[in-house]
Amino acid sequence: MKDTEEGNCQGGENAVAWTAEAARFRFRTLVVKAFLGAWEASGAFEWTALGYLALSSVMISLFGENLTHLAGLVGLQALVAAVILILCYGEARSAELVKQASSTFSSKFWHFWRHWYPHVFFLFCFEEMSRLIHLVNPGWEDAKLMAFDLWLTGVNPALWFEHLARPALTEFMEFSYFTYFVYLLILGGILYCKRDWKSYWAVMTYSAVGYVFGYVIAMLFPVQSPWFTLPGQWHSGQSGGPFTALINWIEKYGRVHGAAFPSQHVAGATAALWGAWRHRRWLFWIFLPFVACMCVSTVYVRNHYVADVLGGLVTGTLGYVLGRRVMKVPGSVANATETLPIIASH
């Protein structure tokens, strides 16, 4: 009897152990299936975004001696990557369910955030640069860019502009500087409303590739900007109107110390401008004068050197050129996204 009871006890323990192992195996299988489903539902933008997160995580691991809270930084990168994959998987799953029924609040939710999260991702990456700017190089390279500006123009442009400063001109320049925030929103919004998904993801990918070039360069070649390098060399501050106040508020709470070269403002605007040229030519001609004024404004408002502007023009254009090539790769636009116009019409 005793031997029988011990045998039953051991059998029960083995059964519990087997059940626990089976549960772990099922969980790992579900995770792998979910990851593969999310990856299959991703497109060119996700390839670029996840590639940047992987690259920056590797750089953090290799050159982390200049940083603090390394584990937290890598963990944050992994969390952002997980959110991206969840959005891709969630939209793909909701699209499959809609095929069998009709559009729901849930499907609209997943579809909206799947398409509009890139703007939040760009903001995250830019703000994160304040922690990564000295990842590789602990110093600042502003002196080199000031020397380049002097060679190119014969003056220090950020200081030279002061003799032209007037409240009305400052307000116009601050308005021009603000327009950076709306180019991709306007172009993306038009393409989104027209359900032109291939063009929509193309312009997002142009911007993503251009930004990645800029972020990596900023980590290798940190630059502060005239605002931080030349304090006290201006005779007065810049006064204007509501747009001046708005930009001052944005800079107060969102300014990044560093990452001035190349100008991400100019790079993002340039990529969007090329996107308009490619996909909505009439919008290109509307954007063009505003983008030109925005490029000048970045120097006038003391946030960039001329070299930063030229660098942004180059990286934004590279984003467009290479982004177009990436968009030719099969699967660059997820199937769920491509079929949604039919689903949405139900």
Image (cartoon, grey):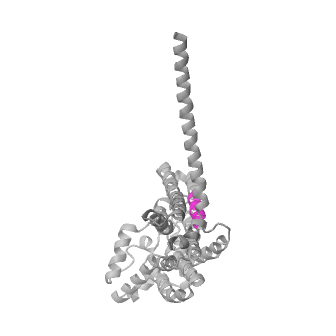
Image quadrant where residue 338 sits: bottom right
Please give the name of the residue rendered at 57% of the width and 31% of the height, measured from the top-left corner. Answer: 18
**Depth check, front residue: 123 or 342:** 342
Please indicate whether residue 251 sits to the left or right of residue 221 in the image: left
- Magenta-colored span: 45-55
Give the x, y percent position of residue 176. Answer: 43, 83
Examine the rendered structure and indicate whether residue 54 appears above or below residue 141.
above
Give the x, y percent position of residue 49. Answer: 56, 63
Please indicate whether residue 212 sits to the left or right of residue 69 in the image: right
**Depth check, front residue: 133 or 24:** 24
In the image, residue 127 lies in the stretch drawn in magenta: no
Can see residue 172? yes
Examine the rendered structure and indicate whether residue 108 appears above or below residue 147.
above
Please indicate whether residue 315 sits to the left or right of residue 237 in the image: right
Q: How many marks?
A: 0
Predominant secondary structure, magenta span = helix
**Depth check, front residue: 320 or 18:** 18
Please give the name of the residue rendered at 61% of the width and 59% of the height, measured from the top-left corner. Answer: 40
Give the x, y percent position of residue 169. Answer: 38, 88
